[in-house]
Image (cartoon, helix red, strand yellow):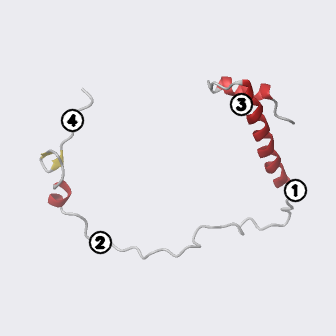
Amino acid sequence: MPITTKDVMRVADLARLDVNEADAVLYASQLQKILGHVEKLSEVDTLGADDKTAKTAGTRPLREDKAVKGLSQDDALKNAPERSDGCIKVPQIIE
């Protein structure tokens, strides 16, 4: 199903985008090319393909999870513009 400039203008209107006729022609052409590339995916034979072959999780080595000492409260507050009771004081935004 070809994408027309009317389709582009309708979507632009729904998205409240200001698209002129010349741009709509360009966008329709670009969208048609994109859909053509996506349609090529339907040509790939996936029958019998193992759905686990594309697994990417765990393929990179992970560093060892070690507990390390963090900043002390004084170090964490060292550059705070204002402090109050051991916390960073920020301006109140809700009354």
Q: Residues within 10 Å of mark 4 (few under 14, many from 20)?
A: few
Q: Quadrant of the C terminus?
A: top left
Of labels 3 and 1, the one closer to you: 3
Q: Residues within 10 Å of mark 1 (few under 14, many from 20)?
A: few
Real-space Cα separation, disc 3 to disc 2, in angstroms: 56 Å
Element under label 4?
A: loop
Left or right: where does residue 27 sit relative to residue 43?
left
Mark 4: which amino acid? Pro
Q: Which mark is residue 43?
A: 1
Q: Position of residue 77 (x, y in %)?
A: 17, 54
Of labels 3 and 2, the one closer to you: 3
Q: Residue at x 79, y 25 (%)?
A: 6
Q: Which residue is mark 2?
A: 68
Contact between marks 3 and 1 (CB within 8 A): the answer is no
Q: Residue at x 75, y 35 (%)?
A: 26
Element under label 2?
A: loop
Q: Which mark is residue 91?
A: 4
